[in-house]
Amino acid sequence: MASWKQVEEQAPELAARARAILDALRHKTIATLRADGSPRISGIEAAFADGELTFGSMTASRKGADLVRDPRFALHSAAYDPPEDEAQWEGDAKIAGRAVSTGSVDGPGDSPAGDAFRADVTEVVVTRLNDAADRLVVESWREGRGVRRVERE
């Protein structure tokens, strides 16, 4: 598994594209695994800081309990409809990996405390349209495999 900094070093263009998409909007979606193994989708905020991808959860939240029990996650950029000129659509980004607890943090102001995590990244995917807007481009990185690009009609 890799830190975000290692992803940036191994796949700088893809990492920059994924980060720009993820940073474009504040809210993202995270998938975690419930105790019975079924998926759970939750809203989340995430940030890139000091070479790490970080996120958190309110104390005693279901998603936090999921991550403590089974740290596998998939993070997805906030979805929005492509503009009329689909060639201008930046695409969407997904990051998968394992959440590593970094302890508790105080919430801002009167907000409750929460649990903090950093991501050990196993996969980064950006899906977008090619310049002609006639094919889907899927670019992905996995540790030890590097970057792959696939175009689909």
Image (cartoon, helix red, strand yellow):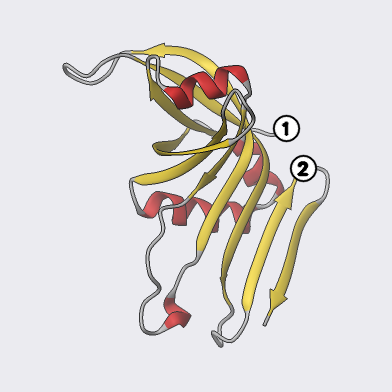
Q: Amino acid at mark 2?
A: Glu
Q: Nearer the viewer, residue 33 or 142?
A: 33
Residue under pointer 2: 143
Residue under pointer 1: 1
Q: How many marks can you see? A: 2
Q: Secondary structure at mark 2?
A: loop
Residue at figure coordinates x 71%, y 52% from the top left: 141
Counting from the top left corner in percent of width and height, residue 119 is at 58, 31
Q: Amino acid at mark 1?
A: Met
Counting from the top left corner in percent of width and height, residue 80 is at 37, 63
Counting from the top left corner in percent of width and height, residue 116 is at 45, 20
Q: Quadrant of the N terminus?
A: top right
Name above or below for residue 35 compared with residue 84: above
Q: Nearer the viewer, residue 15 or 39?
A: 39
- Separation (CA) of disc 1 from disc 2: 7 Å
Counting from the top left corner in percent of width and height, residue 132 is at 56, 88
Q: How crowded is the residue under tag 2: few (<14 C-alpha within 10 Å), some, or many (20+)?
A: some
Q: Quadrant of the C terminus?
A: bottom right
Residue at figure coordinates x 51%, y 15% from the top left: 102
Q: Look at the numbered discs 1 and 2 and tell me whether their residues touch, using CB distance below 8 Å.
A: yes
Name above or below for residue 31 compared with residue 18: above
Name above or below for residue 114 compared with residue 72: above
Give the left or right position of residue 23, taking residue 6 as reference.
left
Residue at the limit of the structure toward the right, as seen here: 144
Q: How crowded is the residue under tag 1: few (<14 C-alpha within 10 Å), some, or many (20+)?
A: some
Q: Closer to the N terminus: mark 1 or mark 2? A: 1
Residue at figure coordinates x 50%, y 60% from the top left: 92
Residue at figure coordinates x 59%, y 51% from the top left: 15
